[in-house]
Structures are given as structure tokens and as C-alpha cells.
């Protein structure tokens, strides 16, 4: 029996852990970069705004932290307009670096000095947390064995208790977001000038105080299905991210939904004009498919409900 944070860490990142042995997210669940090129297009629009605010420096970074198979980093590199691409340095950060084309750098640790845009797309939800439950008015750690059988551990104290008191009042069961706060604050600190963006499924205090997610959100994914969270290395383990505590830990940022963010960056799911079907059916089909992908990215009940947390660094927003 170990506390959930240690068991989760080992299940994903010990040498034979799920991600450490090179499992690719695309084989197990669908994320926005896998839907199509549209997320990369929107992030290039955001990067252009950052680049403009930075006065178009000689080199501008796009850093994708927790890059998975590198799909987002590669799309950003490939879709960048020629004038930007000459100055663009795209880096995919991943525990087991993916195979990517020349032109995209890969590394296993976060760069220390970023000028441009750093993105953590569904990165924070993969950072292990402590799991706790309330019993007889006391908040206790939850311990777990390799088969997923749980028992109660010691009472929660110190910084984890402070976090729960501040960020997750009265749960039945909860994940303590402190490890995500620390990771995100560290990532944001590495941006000397530009912006840092976390995109993830998450919640904010208003949700938690209203009793949403009262039983916690820890779950597993395997081969496209949601499965029981068993920390034996066979499956992804994940939990929603407390976006507001990450924002505060990193000095305050703006939280919005993916649907609103993509609209602000110019993506629209409007269907093509019907007349095109007769004059240029191939283009019409392309545009219908694109509208379908944007509808998926902006669906409020799905990917559109994801949170975008944006911080500006070293310049005026
Ligand atoms: C949920 S997947 C998301 C993959 C991709 N960003 C996407 O949205 O399709 C999370 C990824 O973050 C990676 N990861 C977690 N912690 C990391 C770290 N400290 N450094 C690099 N990669 C990390 C995991 O290995 C995993 O591939």
C-alpha cells in the first residue's frame, strides 16, 4: 500500500510506467491536437499576437510541454507562415521523446529561458496528486495497492491540508492540486517574455464549492475507454485540474473556456455556402469537414468546455 500520489507517479513515470515506456496518448484517448490542424492554427494566431507584442524578436519559441506524440508541435511547425518559420524554434518536451521531423526539437526537461509561447496541453492532468477522503470529519490520505484496492492512510496535514481548506471545501473525496500548482508555477517562471498557456479539463472554486466533483475525478484511460484507476502501469491515470489554484500559484492568469478562446482567435464552425457544393464539390467537402472539426473543438459539453489558463510574462498583455 502506498499513498495515491506515489502509486500514480510510479504507474506513469517509473521506468516501466505507462508514459515512461513510451505509450502515446493518441492510442488511448482523443485530445484537441488529434482532431485536426485547427488547434495549431489558433495557437499560431496567439503566437503571432505574442510575437507582435515582443516586437518580432530574432528567435521566437513555441514550447509544447507534455507533447505526447508531438502532434501539436509538428502542426505548429508545419503550418507556421514562412516569415515566422524562419525565426520560430519549436520544442516538444516529453518524458519519452516522440519521433518528430527535423525542425522540431525534442527534450525531456523544460527549457529554462523561453521567449514566445509555452503551452501545456493536457499536461497538468497527468501530474500525480495526493488523493484524500473525509471520514468522521477528518481528512485522510487514501492509500492503494497495485490492484487498485484502497485503504485509509494518516490524516492530511501541513501544506496539503492548507490547500484543501483554501481550494476544495467539503469534498467527500478529492485530489490535492498542490503538485500541479508547483509544476505550473515552475513552467510559467521559465517564460522570460511572452505567454504561458495551460489547456485542460478542470474545475474552479465555484464548481467545487457548489458540490460538483464531490467524489473526486481520478480515473483511468486505456485503448479509448474510460476504465477503473488501477496504478499498475497498464493504463493512463488522470484527474481534473484545479485551474484557479494553478493560476494563483503562477502569479495570476486569465481563465476562459476553449470555446471562447478559439472564437477569440478567429475559429468559426460556420458551414460553407451551399452554392459551393455545385461549383467546387471538393472544396465544399473540405470545408464541411473543417466545420465539423471546429464544432468538436468548441462543443461546450466536450472539448469546448476545457479551460484555457493564460499568463503574460515580461510585457504588456
Ligand atoms: C495527457 S498526455 C497529453 C499529450 C498531448 N499534449 C496531447 O494533448 O495530445 C500528457 C503527456 O504529458 C507527459 N508529461 C507528463 N509530465 C511530464 C514532464 N514533466 N515532462 C515532459 N512530459 C511530461 C506525459 O508523458 C504524457 O505524454
Image (cartoon, grey):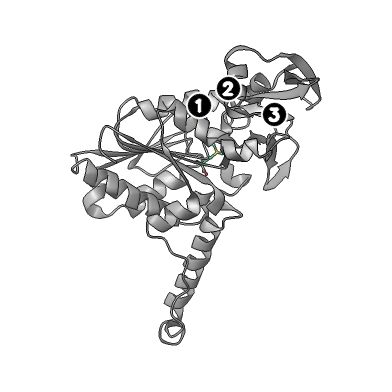
Question: For mark 1, what is the residue?
Answer: 181
Mark 1 vs mark 2: in front: 2
* Residue 280 % position (x, y): 41, 82
Please state which of residues 85 and 164 is positioned toward the viewer in this rendering: 164
The quarter of the displayed image where residue 189 is located? top left
The answer to whether residue 49 shows anywhere in this view is yes
* Quadrant housing the C terminus: top left
In this figure, what is the number of numbered marks?
Answer: 3
Left or right, 8 with respect to 254, comes to right
Please state which of residues 283 and 295 is positioned toward the viewer in this rendering: 295
Q: Earlier in the sequence, mark 3 or mark 1?
A: 3
Of helix, strand and loop, which one carries label 2? helix
Question: For mark 3, what is the residue?
Answer: 170
Left or right, 130 with respect to 242, comes to right
**Distance Cα–Cα, label 1 vs label 2:** 10 Å
Q: Is mark 3 within 8 Å of ligand 1?
A: no
Q: Is mark 1 within 8 Å of ligand 1?
A: no
**Distance Cα–Cα, label 3 vs label 2:** 12 Å
Residue at position x 48%, y 73% in the image: 271
* Quadrant housing the N terminus: top right
Evaluate if marks 3 and 1 touch, with contact meaning CB atoms under 8 Å apart. Answer: no
Please state which of residues 267 and 211 is positioned toward the viewer in this rendering: 211
Evaluate if marks 1 and 2 touch, with contact meaning CB atoms under 8 Å apart. Answer: yes
Q: Mark 3: few, some, or many residues within 10 Å (few <14, many ≥20)?
A: some
Q: Earlier in the sequence, mark 1 or mark 2?
A: 2
Question: For mark 2, what is the residue?
Answer: 163
Q: Earlier in the sequence, mark 3 or mark 2?
A: 2
Q: Mark 2: few, some, or many residues within 10 Å (few <14, many ≥20)?
A: some
Amino acid at each position: 500500500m502506498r499513498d495515491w500520489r506515489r502509486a500514480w507517479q510510479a504507474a506513469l513515470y517509473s521506468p516501466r510506467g505507462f508514459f515512461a515506456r513510451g505509450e502515446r496518448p493518441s492510442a488511448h484517448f482523443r485530445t484537441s491536437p488529434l482532431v485536426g490542424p485547427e488547434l495549431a492554427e489558433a495557437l499560431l494566431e496567439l503566437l503571432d499576437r505574442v510575437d507582435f507584442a515582443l516586437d518580432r524578436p530574432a528567435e521566437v519559441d513555441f514550447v509544447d510541454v507534455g507533447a505526447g506524440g508531438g502532434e501539436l508541435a509538428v502542426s505548429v511547425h508545419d503550418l507556421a507562415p514562412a516569415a515566422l518559420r524562419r525565426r520560430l524554434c519549436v520544442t516538444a518536451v516529453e518524458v519519452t521523446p516522440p519521433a518528430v521531423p527535423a525542425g522540431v526539437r525534442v527534450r525531456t526537461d523544460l527549457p529554462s529561458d523561453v521567449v514566445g509561447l509555452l503551452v501545456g496541453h493536457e499536461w497538468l492532468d497527468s501530474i500525480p496528486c495526493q488523493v484524500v477522503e473525509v471520514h468522521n470529519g477528518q481528512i485522510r490520505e487514501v492509500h492503494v495497492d497495485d490492484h487498485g484496492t484502497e485503504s485509509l492512510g494518516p490524516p492530511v496535514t501541513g501544506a496539503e491540508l492548507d490547500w484543501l481548506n483554501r481550494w476544495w471545501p467539503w469534498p467527500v473525496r478529492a485530489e490535492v492540486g498542490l503538485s500541479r500548482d508547483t509544476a505550473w508555477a515552475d513552467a510559467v517562471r521559465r517564460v522570460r517574455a511572452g505567454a504561458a498557456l495551460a489547456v485542460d479539463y478542470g474545475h474552479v472554486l465555484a464548481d467545487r464549492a457548489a458540490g460538483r466533483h464531490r467524489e473526486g475525478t481520478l480515473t483511468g484511460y486505456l485503448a479509448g475507454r474510460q476504465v477503473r484507476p488501477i496504478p499498475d502501469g497498464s493504463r493512463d491515470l488522470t484527474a481534473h485540474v484545479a485551474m484557479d489554484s494553478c493560476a494563483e500559484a503562477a502569479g495570476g492568469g486569465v481563465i476562459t473556456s476553449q470555446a471562447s478562446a478559439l472564437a477569440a482567435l478567429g475559429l468559426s464552425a460556420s458551414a460553407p455556402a451551399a452554392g459551393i457544393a455545385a461549383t467546387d464539390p471538393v472544396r465544399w467537402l473540405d470545408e464541411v469537414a473543417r466545420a465539423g472539426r471546429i464544432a468538436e473543438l468548441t462543443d461546450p459539453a466536450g472539448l469546448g468546455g476545457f479551460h484555457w489558463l493564460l499568463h503574460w510574462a515580461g510585457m504588456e498583455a
